[in-house]
Image: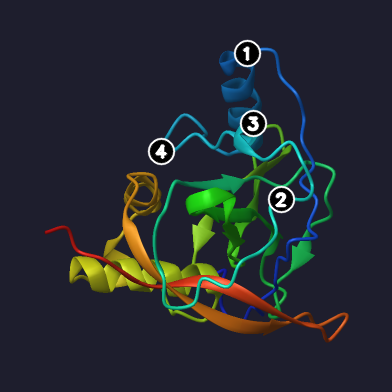
Amino acid sequence: MTNEFEDMYDDDFTDDTIVSEEKTNSGEDTKKTTEELIATGNQGLVYDYNTAPDTVKGPERENLDGKTVTIQKADIILPPPEKEWEWSKQKTSQYKPCMFVVKYDDGQQEYYSGVRVFRRKDKNNNDKYSHPQIQNNAKTQASKLKTTYAEYKGVKPEEITLKQFMSFLNSKPKAVIKSEGVENPETEKITYKNFVSEFVKEQ
């Protein structure tokens, strides 16, 4: 079976990224909408895009390099249905990038690129999303974070399910931050991002 992540490039989210949100009236509406987007959406994790921030601009970014923080929450936000599909480099599959945001103490947060949904078809030939996927090769920001978690657990990244990974990130773990410069390919501007470099084991 073809690996849909094969030879795909790493795209980057910045703080200027605007989340497209669709308001729903209840949790049931949110669950129904999510399941309509994801093929076999009744299996695995339900991705609630209502957890996305309501404001475009958050608190002023702080340099957290070397600091130990508590991860308060981690969210994967599915792309809106109207977003165009992109082709993989090998032209073997189509995907859309998801937004993956990890929230730290004091309102600080970071966006990790590299989470994607792939194009699926239901029995009526309607477009659906696969469940969000993260590589295991530590080449994208999200896959590096997953690899860091695998090292913390003493297992290989491919042994970690997305549900286990997200559940851990939402269990308020402590982590050490490393500030890294990331270049925006369009503007060539360098932004320093606060990435998790290691997780702190509980005493």
Please name the residue that numbered disc 1 is placed on: 26
Q: Is residue 190 left or right of residue 39?
A: right
Query: Which labelled disc corresponds to residue 58?
Result: 2
Neighbourhood count class around disc 1 (C-alpha, 10 Å): few under 14, some 14–19, many 20 upward: few
Point out the tag, 1 or 2, that comes first from the N-terminus.
1
- Which-is-in-front pick, marks 1 and 4? 1
Q: Nearer the viewer, residue 90 or 82?
A: 82
Neighbourhood count class around disc 2 (C-alpha, 10 Å): few under 14, some 14–19, many 20 upward: few
Label 2 is placed on what type of residue? Gly
Q: How is the image coloured?
A: rainbow
Point out the tag, 4 or 2, that comes first from the N-terminus.
4
Cβ–Cβ below 8 Å for labels 1 and 2?
no
Which residue occupies 73% across, 66% down? Answer: 14
Which residue occupies 55% across, 76% down? Answer: 140
Please name the residue that numbered disc 3 is placed on: 50
Which quadrant of the structure image shows residue 49? top right
Which quadrant of the structure image shows residue 68? bottom left
The residue furthest left is: 203
Which residue occupies 57% across, 68% down? Answer: 4
Work out whether 199 lies above or below 126.
below
Q: CA distance from mark 1 to mark 3?
A: 10 Å
Q: CA distance from mark 1 to mark 2?
A: 26 Å
The C terminus: image quadrant:
bottom left
